[in-house]
């Protein structure tokens, strides 16, 4: 399910957006702590962010730069500030689009769909499809879709990188250091628990495909993908 993170301090607008987008099968999270927007973003790993400019303490431009320094996740600004300079600043700080308030919900939805298609779907600029297949478990690294038999799940970028590492090194112990380097450029700024959280997420996605206990924790060494779904056939 596509995850959308809404960073908006007006509770009325926030709830309207959340309720409307939820009807289209998007998983919605609204900001819990305006001092910890980047931390919440990294923890939840959304596929798209809706971001206001006027926020408590730091403005949306600041948070856009912070997010963009760690992720290429699409960011759409939604703001009452309608000057051309604000829109230019949004784009220069890393935004993908800009919507002015008041807005029509249908326009917001259309822009979200357009960006998601371009980034994750059929309009993606990089057209070459790279598919990794291991014993029937298939990962499309261009669409972030992991599939097995007649089921498929959509991964986040970090989950896709993890799945790619496991599928290209099956039945091998992969060190935590290797995975941390694969997922984050600077390990010094990554909490030790962050990798464990992402491993839990990829295990959950595998479980949704009917594959359980495939990723083993090797104490003191790392993790290993074992073809349990083959042994259980």
Image (cartoon, rainbow, N blue to C red):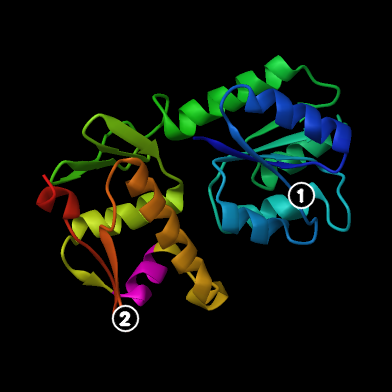
**Quarter of the figure that contains the C terminus:** top left
Q: Does 110 sit left or right of 178 as displayed? A: right
Upstream in sequence: badge 1 or badge 2:
1
How many marks on residues?
2
Is the residue 46 above or below the residue 168 in the image? above
Question: Which quarter of the figure has residue 3?
Answer: top right
Q: Does 61 sit left or right of 171 as displayed? A: right
On the image, the x and y values in percent for residue 83 come to: 86, 31
The residue closer to the viewer here, 42 or 222, is 222
- Dominant SS type (magenta): helix
| Residues marked 1 and 2 touching at CB (< 8 Å) | no
On the image, the x and y values in percent for residue 77 come to: 73, 36
Residue at x-position 64% and y-position 28%: 22
Residue at x-position 41% and y-position 28%: 121
Magenta-highlighted residues = 175-182
Q: Does 141 sit left or right of 132 as displayed? A: right
Residue at x-position 36% and y-position 76%: 177
Residue at x-position 70% and y-position 23%: 20
Residue at the farthest front position = 232
Q: Secondary structure at mark 2?
A: loop
111 falls in the magenta region: no
Q: Residue 219, which numbered label?
A: 2
Residue at the farthest bottom position = 220
Q: Secondary structure at mark 1?
A: helix
Q: Residue 61, which numbered label?
A: 1
On the image, the x and y values in percent for residue 190 come to: 54, 72
Q: Is residue 43 visible?
A: yes
- Packing grade of label 1 (10 A; few <14, some 14-19, many >=20) is many
Q: Is residue 81 visible?
A: no
């Amino acid at each position: 399910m596509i995850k959308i993170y809404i960073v908006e301090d007006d509770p009325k607008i926030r709830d309207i957006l959340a309720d409307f987008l939820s009807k289209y099968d998007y998983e919605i999270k609204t900001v819990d702590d305006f001092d910890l927007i980047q931390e919440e973003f990294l923890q939840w790993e959304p596929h798209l962010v809706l971001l206001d400019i006027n926020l408590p303490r730091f403005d949306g431009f600041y948070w856009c730069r912070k997010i963009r320094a760690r992720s290429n996740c699409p960011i759409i600004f939604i703001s009452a500030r309608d000057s051309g300079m604000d829109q230019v600043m949004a784009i220069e700080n890393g935004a993908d689009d800009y919507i002015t308030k008041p807005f029509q919900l249908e326009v917001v939805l259309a822009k979200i769909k357009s960006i998601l298609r371009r980034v994750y779907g059929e309009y993606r600029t990089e057209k070459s499809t790279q598919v990794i297949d291991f014993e029937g478990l298939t990962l499309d690294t261009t669409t972030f879709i992991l599939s097995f038999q007649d089921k498929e799940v959509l991964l986040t970028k970090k989950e896709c990188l993890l799945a790619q590492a496991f599928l290209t090194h099956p039945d091998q112990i992969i060190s935590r250091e290797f995975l941390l380097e694969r997922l984050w450029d600077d390990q010094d700024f990554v909490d030790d628990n962050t990798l464990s959280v992402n491993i839990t997420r990829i295990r959950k996605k595998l479980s949704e495909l009917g594959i359980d206990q495939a990723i083993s924790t090797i104490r003191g060494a790392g993790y290993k993908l074992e073809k349990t779904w083959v042994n259980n056939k």
